[in-house]
Amino acid sequence: MASKVTFIGAGNMAGAIIGGMIESGVSPDDIMATSPSDDILAPLRERLSIHTATDNAAAVAESDVVVLAVKPQIMREVCEKMRDAVQARRPLIVSVAAGLPAETLEHWLGGDLPLVRCMPNTPALVGAGAAGLYANANVDDAQRRLATELMEAVGLVEWVDDEALLDAVTAVSGSAPAYFFLMFEAMEETGVKLGLPADTARRLAMQTALGAAKMALSSDKLPGELKRNVMSPGGTTERAVEHLEEAGLRRIMAEAMTACADRASEMADELGKR
Ligand SMILES: NC(=O)C1=CN([C@@H]2O[C@H](COP(=O)(O)OP(=O)(O)OC[C@H]3O[C@@H](n4cnc5c(N)ncnc54)[C@H](OP(=O)(O)O)[C@@H]3O)[C@@H](O)[C@H]2O)C=CC1
Ligand SMILES: O=C(O)[C@@H]1CCC=N1
């Protein structure tokens, strides 16, 4: 990727994407990150050799792609302060913020801009991210390819035609690493109660999740069949899976994921007013 990409905000999500980009071979010379605090930027300069700046408008002036990666709560102020620089340069805008609608972001930045909304996740850091992308009507084919190239450097990319579906993507993948991390905590705790050392239980649980995901991704069988293949009749897995089903795991997942998607749309109502 020869385009100059600037990340406005250098926190968890931007750090994960930048780390994954460099790991995949993108030149650090093409990457810039901004933050009000040089304490956050100094390690990025030293560890990753990327460019950094504390002035968002100055950074935008040299960019082909501007990734908005600050918290949704401060996005309006951040966008309005760099509006003139954005309008002068007219880069492709990529927002990773949960909830905030494309039309609102475009308006805060002065209007009539090519803007891609992206819902990534933090496994981007290890090249195993999953992202949903939506393009507004100003994005041309070359810019769509550019956004795809940016996010494919750090994982899977799925485009959606309906912006509202990004709330579903948030529930299925954006927030979902946390569901699995919670599961690892629970499995480790129980492994310890059953007598294993904590680090042994943790490693076994994590390796099993990795193996199950790899196997499901490479298999032509659906997850239900792979699950049944582990469940010997009258055996141990059957007992565990019956317990999970009776305890309502599917209902709990449905409620949690619906709450997640609802929160994204609530955030659009709370924070996304023009
Ligand atoms: N974390 C995740 O898993 C995911 C997050 N997202 C989205 O990514 C965005 C960022 O989230 P996340 O990385 O978790 O948040 P973080 O708080 O980790 O990162 C945001 C960064 O922006 C910095 N910042 C604050 N003000 C400015 C400013 N004026 N200019 C530049 N930078 C500024 C903050 O600095 P300081 O702390 O000093 O204020 C902080 O380092 C959010 O919109 C979120 O919805 C999307 C998908 C997944
Ligand atoms: O929790 C959040 O709001 C952000 C968006 C998706 C993951 N983290």
Image (cartoon, rainbow, N blue to C red):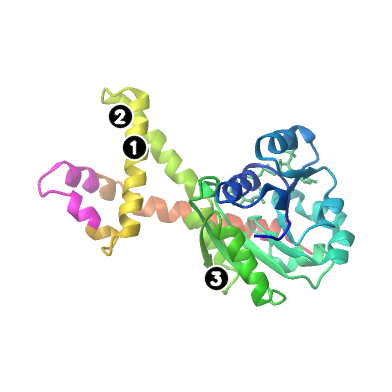
Observer able to see residue 38: yes
In the image, taking residue 157 as reference, residue 240 lies left or right, namely left
Mark 1 or mark 3, which is nearer the start of the sequence?
3
Q: Nearer the viewer, residue 97 or 27?
A: 27
- Amino acid type shown at disc 1: Ala
The nearer-to-camera label among 2 and 1 is 1
Q: Position of residue 266 (x, y in %)?
A: 63, 58
Q: Residues within 10 Å of mark 2 (few under 14, many from 20)?
A: some
Q: Is residue 237 magenta?
A: yes
The answer to whether marks 2 and 1 mark residues whose Cβ atoms lie closer than 8 Å is yes
Q: List the residue tagged with mark 3.
A: 160
Q: CA distance from mark 3 to mark 1?
A: 33 Å
The residues tagged by marks 3 and 2 sit, at their Cα atoms, a distance apart of 40 Å
Residue 76: where, in percent of width, then height? 79, 55
- Circle 2 sits in a helix, a strand or a loop, which is it? helix
Identify the element where label 3 is drawn: loop
Q: Residue at x 63, y 55 (%)?
A: 98
Q: How many marks?
A: 3
Is any atom of residue 248 visible in this view? no
Residue receiving disc 2: 191
At x 45%, y 45%, the residue is 179
Foreground residue among 252 and 106? 106
Please name the residue that numbered disc 1 is placed on.
205
Helix, strand or loop: magenta stretch: helix
What label does residue 244 carry, if any? none
Going from N to C along the chain, the mark reached first, 2 or 1, is 2
Residue 41 image offset from top left, x and y in percent = 74, 37
Dot 3 or dot 2, earlier in sequence: 3
- Part of the protein shown in magenta: 226-242
Image point (26%, 59%), residue name: 224
- Counting other residues with Cα less than 10 Å from the Cα at mark 3, is it few (<14), some (14-19), or many (20 or more)? some
